Image (spheres, helix red, strand yellow):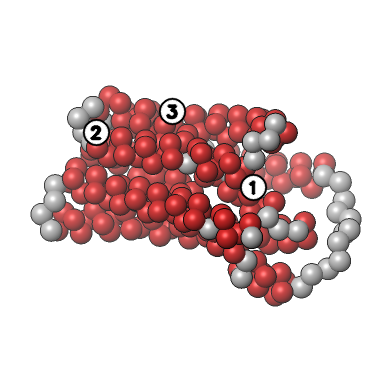
């Protein structure tokens, strides 16, 4: 399987090299040091950064690592059943990203901006996380559905990448997105490890395994909600 993935990646690289037109520079060269410095000092970047760290990072951390343990250790599913549930989650995520890529330009043409989609759509992520945490093991058959809804609703946060790209001049957009991706993957790494550490620590202090999961996921939900509030709070000052 890994050999097939490696071969597929190699084929994609060859196709990109063969099919893309040659690059022609149309902008005046901007030094890397000045470019990154201007990005990391920009309020627009820091307004969205917490969403990337907690919202997008939390999504990837759960999707790639903690969804399956939740199904097994909280919902009582077998590893084979959790694997099937995880496949359905990832398939739904694939379709969700494809649909967003298809309809977002149309929404933009009708006045529905990326910022508005993030503002009004992100709370659905927090509601599904609250539902997942509060239900716990009481409805095990619904756990894959709840996790799927959480991941799908979290795709609103993924639009923050587009917002970052549109917030900077064309010659800085690539560096801005690279900086934002660094924030996202730092969030993924931190949250993946922190979830395991928090679950173990809570159990050491007398919490049951299920309640440790619930408190840990609930804390992540609160952090994600706070990052959304921060995004809203900085909006009026940014427009001045």
Question: Of circles 3 and 2, which is in front?
Answer: 2
Q: State the mark number for residue 135.
A: 2
Q: Residue at x 37, y 37 (%)?
A: 127
Query: Label 2's element?
Result: helix
Asked whether residue 83 appears in the rendered view, the answer is no
Q: Earlier in the sequence, mark 2 or mark 1?
A: 2
Q: Is residue 206 above or below residue 153?
A: below
Query: Label 1's element?
Result: helix
Q: Residue at x 57, y 60 (%)?
A: 237
Q: Picture coordinates of residue 203 (x, y %)?
A: 16, 54
Q: Picture coordinates of residue 170 (x, y %)?
A: 77, 56
Looking at this rendering, what residue extends furthest in the bottom direction?
Answer: 33
Q: Is residue 133 above or below residue 204?
A: above
Question: Of circles 3 and 1, which is in front?
Answer: 1
Q: How far is mark 2 from mark 1, CA to CA?
A: 34 Å
Q: Residue at x 64, y 60 (%)?
A: 240
Q: Which residue is mark 1?
A: 162
Q: Is residue 149 above or below residue 191?
A: above
Looking at this rendering, what residue extends furthest in the left direction?
Answer: 206
Viewer-nearest residue: 181 or 218: 218
Query: Label 3's element?
Result: helix
* Rendering quarter of residue 176: bottom right
Q: Which residue is mark 3?
A: 88
Q: How far is mark 3 from mark 1, CA to CA?
A: 26 Å
Whether residue 143 sits left or right of residue 37 in the image: it is left
């Amino acid at each position: 399987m890994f050999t097939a993935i490696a071969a597929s990646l190699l084929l994609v690289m060859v196709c990109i090299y063969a099919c893309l037109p040659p690059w022609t520079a149309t902008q005046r060269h901007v030094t890397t040091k000045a470019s990154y410095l201007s990005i990391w000092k920009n309020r627009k970047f820091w307004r969205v950064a917490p969403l990337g760290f907690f919202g997008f990072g939390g999504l990837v951390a759960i999707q790639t690592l903690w969804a399956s343990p939740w199904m097994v250790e909280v919902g009582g599913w077998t590893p084979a059943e959790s694997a099937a549930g995880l496949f359905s989650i990832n398939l739904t995520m694939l379709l969700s990203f494809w649909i967003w890529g298809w309809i977002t330009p149309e929404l933009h043409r009708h006045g529905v901006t990326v910022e508005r989609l993030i503002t009004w759509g992100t709370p659905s992520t927090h509601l599904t996380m609250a539902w997942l945490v509060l239900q716990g093991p009481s409805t095990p058959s619904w756990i894959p559905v709840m996790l799927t809804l959480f991941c799908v609703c979290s795709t609103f946060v993924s639009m923050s990448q587009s917002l970052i790209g549109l917030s900077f001049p064309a010659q800085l957009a690539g560096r801005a997105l690279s900086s934002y991706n660094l924030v996202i993957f730092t969030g993924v790494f931190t949250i993946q490890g922190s979830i395991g550490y928090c679950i173990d620590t809570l159990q050491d202090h007398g919490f049951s395994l299920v309640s440790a999961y619930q408190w840990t996921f609930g804390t992540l939900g609160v952090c994600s909600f706070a990052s959304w509030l921060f995004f809203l709070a900085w909006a009026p000052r940014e427009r001045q």
